[in-house]
Every structure is written in structure tokens, then in C-alpha cells.
């Protein structure tokens, strides 16, 4: 590699890092929002919601490259 190519790659890497830093910066909120009404606490039954089980099943099936109907989740424990 010649020096110009190495310089271009370094400049591109710096530009990518700067773009990521800009995207991660929280947006300035010009007007403070009114405080939201507190939500009623959900009853903790100790069982995960169906949506959580579905999301975990889909993620596992995708990662393992298998059909979602072949995934059997026996338990989910909150850490």
C-alpha cells in the first residue's frame, strides 16, 4: 500500500467515528415536555409476557438458523 491509500483509509475511519459520535449525541429538546402521568405498575406474576417469549424465540431461531416452531423455551429467569 502506498502512503496516499493509508492516509485515505485513516481519514475515512476518522469520518466514520465522528459520524457515530454525532448520531449518539442526544438531541437538544427546546421545550421541556410535560411530565407524563405515572403508569400503573404491572402486576408481577413471575411469568414473562408472551411478547417477551415470542421475541426470544424469534431471536434464537434466527441465530440458530432453524424454524421457530422447533424452539421450545422451558424457562426464562430475570437476572
Image (cartoon, rainbow, N blue to C red):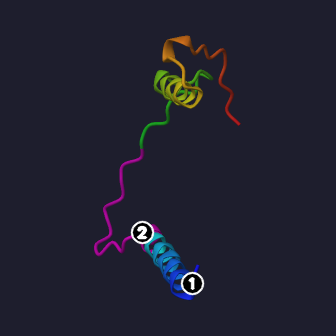
* Residue occupying the point 48% across, 23% down: 54
User: Start and end of the magenta stretch?
Assistant: 22-38
Quadrant in the rendering for residue 28: bottom left
* Residue occupying the point 47% across, 72% down: 16
- Give the mark nearer the N terminus: 1 vs 2: 1
Q: Which residue position holds label 1?
A: 2
Q: In the structure shown, which secondary structural element does the residue marked by tag 1 occupy?
A: loop
Residues at circles 1 and 2 in contact by the CB criterion of under 8 Å: no
Instruction: Judge whether residue 65 is colored magenta.
Output: no
* Residue occupying the point 49% across, 82% down: 8
Image height check: is 53 above or below 26?
above
Quadrant in the rendering for residue 57: top right
Q: Which residue position holds label 2?
A: 23
Q: Point out the image quarter for the C terminus.
A: top right
Image height check: is 51 above or below 5?
above
Q: Position of residue 65 (x, y in %)?
A: 54, 25
Badge 2: residue crowd in 10 Å (few <14, some 14–19, many ≥20): few
**Helix, strand or loop for the magenta stretch, by majority:** loop
Say which of 62 and 45 sits in front: 62
Say which of 48 and 36 sits in front: 48
Amino acid at each position: 500500500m502506498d502512503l496516499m491509500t493509508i492516509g485515505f483509509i485513516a481519514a475515512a475511519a476518522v469520518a466514520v467515528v465522528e459520524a457515530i459520535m454525532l448520531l449518539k449525541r442526544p438531541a437538544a429538546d427546546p421545550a421541556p415536555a410535560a411530565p407524563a402521568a405515572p403508569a400503573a405498575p404491572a402486576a408481577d406474576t413471575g411469568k414473562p409476557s408472551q411478547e417477551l417469549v415470542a421475541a426470544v424465540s424469534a431471536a434464537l431461531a434466527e441465530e440458530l438458523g432453524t424454524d421457530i416452531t422447533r424452539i421450545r423455551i422451558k424457562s426464562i429467569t430475570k437476572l
